[in-house]
Image (cartoon, rainbow, N blue to C red):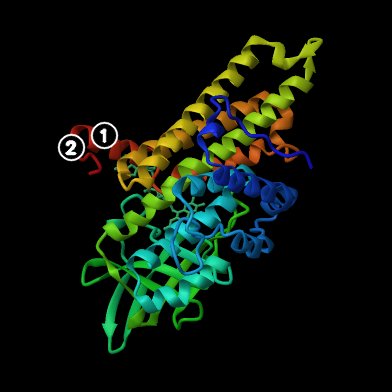
Amino acid sequence: MEQFEGSDFYNLDDLLTEEQRLIRDTVREFVDDQVIPCIEDCFMTDRFPLQIIPTLGELGLLGSNLKGYDCAGLDNLSYGLIMQELERGDSGVRSFVSVQGGLVMYPIHRYGSDEQKDKFLPQLASGKMIGCFGLTEPDHGSDPSGMITRAVEDGDEYILNGNKMWITNGCVSDVAVVWAKLDDRIRGFLVEKGSPGFSTTMQQKKFSLRASTTSELHFQDCRIPKANLLPGANGLGGPLSCLTQARYGIAWGVVGSAMACFDAAKKYSLSRIQFDRPIGGFQLVQAKLAEMLSEITKAQLLCLRLAQLKESGKMTAQQVSLSKRNNVYWALEIARSARDLLGANGVTHEYPVGRHMLNLESVKTYEGTHDIHTLILGHEITGIPAYK
Ligand SMILES: Cc1cc2nc3c(=O)[nH]c(=O)nc-3n(C[C@H](O)[C@H](O)[C@H](O)COP(=O)(O)OP(=O)(O)OC[C@H]3O[C@@H](n4cnc5c(N)ncnc54)[C@H](O)[C@@H]3O)c2cc1C
């Protein structure tokens, strides 16, 4: 198969180290070899390509920017490049890796006890265990502080009651990081598969992220050992700090979707003949392509600077909001424009564009909707919160 070239209009490759380029190229090859050949079928049949998980582990892509516990300990720019390449394959594959690393391994790494870290992190890094992150509930999405799920102490155990919805990896997980109120404080709990009173159901009939498992989690007098409370997370800041990690990965990831759509649109515009010439020779088509390349280049620059800020420990959640909001918005616009440029072929699975476009609708909504990130930025600019 022909290797994907990517877009690099501003020679950003020059700013990468040899190791970072190697990591990027390795993941690019993995996506070409193991994701692209099966992903349309996975999307059509509502299933995640589970067979790639051992390789994700072997390549060190799970929790790759975490240190110790068999994690790869990569820098944050390399982590971003990994997300970009994976999402070039499919947002569902990037979501799997984002959830595993940013929403499951990160909270255990940051807030967990030594025993929890030893027990879960190496297994999650290798892909022998799969994790999920349960924050959203049927009636509480953008405002998780209103969550209904409750935990109460009972001897050596906690008893959990409630429901979580829209949970990526839920049905296939060995461990769920579940956020619930204990004495009116939001706390994190590790709920292992098979815990009494814990069940999952698959959410179907999605038209987006179909190659990703989405589930409901149900807790009915679910009993877990007291040792499964994350000791370091106390309050809404716990889950929000995880979302900052995952949103960082999304800002990078969607550059990959946008590059895939741009690549397909560019090639199509050069091969499709109408009115006796390639459609790429028409000014209106060139305007679309020029806008795609401009927005991809701007998104890449945002990501690079964000990576530097994250690496130096100076990155703020608001800076991540700006990048997530901007890059997802433009990736979706690019996908829609590419879909249009492909004419009727754009609505088929012969090309990856329609799938990326549909996936990006979910990416725009999860991890804080576009409008919630607008409010976060509005709050930052004016000092006035406008959520309520
Ligand atoms: C495929 C998929 C996978 C997901 N995976 C996970 C997961 O793994 N774990 C998890 O916990 N969650 C997950 N989610 C849930 C996701 O994070 C929520 O859907 C998201 O936070 C939005 O919540 P909601 O759907 O309840 O929408 P709502 O919060 O009900 O929002 C509906 C609309 O109202 C707008 N709105 C809400 N409040 C305001 C306001 N104050 N001002 C202006 N507009 C407002 C929103 O922007 C949106 O347009 C996933 C969702 C999807 C689609």
On the rendered image, what quadrant is the N terminus found in? top right
Label 1 sits on what residue type? Answer: Gly
Q: Is mark 1 within 8 Å of ligand 1?
A: no
State the SS at label 2. loop
Of residues 64 and 352, the one nearer the viewer is 64
Q: At x 59% / y 57%, what residue is drawn?
A: 204
Can residue 207 be seen from the camera position used here? Answer: no
**Marks 1 and 2 close (CB-CB < 8 Å):** yes
Can residue 272 be seen from the camera position used here? Answer: yes
Based on the displayed image, in which of its 4 quarters is residue 112 positioned? bottom left
Q: Position of residue 67 (x, y in %)?
A: 43, 62
Of residues 365 and 125, the one nearer the viewer is 125
Q: State which tag comes first along the sequence, 1 or 2.
A: 1
State the SS at label 1. helix
Residue count near mark 2 (Cα–Cα under 10 Å), binned few <14, some 14–19, many ≥20: few
Q: CA distance from mark 1 to mark 2?
A: 7 Å
Q: Position of residue 309 (x, y in %)?
A: 35, 41
Of residues 305 and 96, the one nearer the viewer is 305
Label 2 sits on what residue type? Answer: Ile
On the rendered image, what quadrant is the C terminus found in? top left
Q: Which residue is mark 1?
A: 378
Q: At x 60% / y 34%, what residue is drawn?
A: 259
Q: At x 56% / y 29%, what residue is drawn?
A: 334
Q: Which residue is mark 2?
A: 384
Residue count near mark 1 (Cα–Cα under 10 Å), binned few <14, some 14–19, many ≥20: some
